[in-house]
Amino acid sequence: DTGVSQDPRHKITKRGQNVTFRCDPISEHNRLYWYRQTLGQGPEFLTYFQNEAQLEKSRLLSDRFSAERPKGSFSTLEIQRTEQGDSAMYLCASSPTAGTRRETQYFGPGTRLLVL
Amino acid sequence: GENVEQHPSTLSVQEGDSAVIKCTYSDSASNYFPWYKQELGKRPQLIIDIRSNVGEKKDQRIAVTLNKTAKHFSLHITETQPEDSAVYFCAASRGWAGNMLTFGGGTRLMVKP
């Protein structure tokens, strides 16, 4: 399966700890997105990259959140000083920048974060 | 920014009946409208999408309609089956130029055998 992959799938941490999640997009996809999904809600946009450039950030992305995509391939999302309100599913998606499916975002399985 | 409203939040139908889920959006510049199906604990999966230059698109038992003037779009599932049971999300974006998706709140569809 050459779909979007995310690691870890589950993370339990204590309030105040830092966590880092990884996303590997579909190999030929230049765009990579991060979303957050809380229980019973639709995903909310956090940020996106085209290659290594971070092009847009949501106001949801507080200064405790940082995302990188250093070589334009995989991406990491770090949350510093976690709070209980950070508990959610963090979804990654990727899309191509050419062709007939260039608007289509393909999602990974997500990382479920629980902050105790 | 864009705001997407989705109704109903839950929908229960008998197997073989049709199901309709409706969404409205606020940004007149939105031109791409995908629908995702999410089963419990799994990733959202694209089931159908429509661009603003067409009014309707069909793929087997699934169809989507778009009314740009009224800013609403709908998902229609015919001959529902138990495996259609899931949460369905509509979304809107400005397409490739402004790619972030804004999602509706989701509809939990239950198909009773």
Image (tube, rainbow, N blue to C red):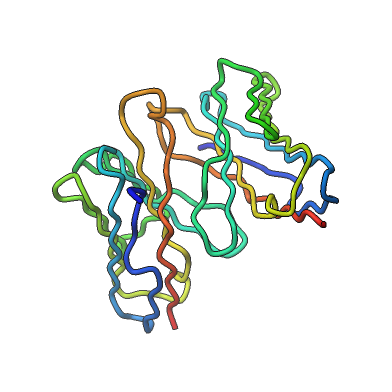
Q: How many discs appear?
A: 0
B97 or B13: which is nearer to us? Answer: B13
Q: Is residue B19 above or below residue A98?
A: below
Q: Is residue B41 left or right of residue B80?
A: left
Q: Is residue A70 above or below residue A115?
A: above
Q: Is residue B88 left or right of residue A15?
A: right
The answer to which quarter of the image holds residue B112 is: bottom right
A60 or A71: which is nearer to us? Answer: A71
A60 or A35: which is nearer to us? Answer: A35
* Residue B15, image x, y percentages: 82, 49
B43 or A83: which is nearer to us? Answer: B43
Q: Is residue A30 left or right of residue B57?
A: left
- The quadrant in which the C terminus of chain A is found is bottom left
Q: Is residue A98 left or right of residue A40?
A: left
Q: Is residue A2 above or below residue A14?
A: above
- Give the residue displayed 68% in from the left and 34% down from the top: B62
* Residue B103, image x, y percentages: 56, 44
- Give the residue displayed 57% in from the left and 26% down from the top: B50
- Give the residue displayed 33% in from the left and 80% down from the top: A16
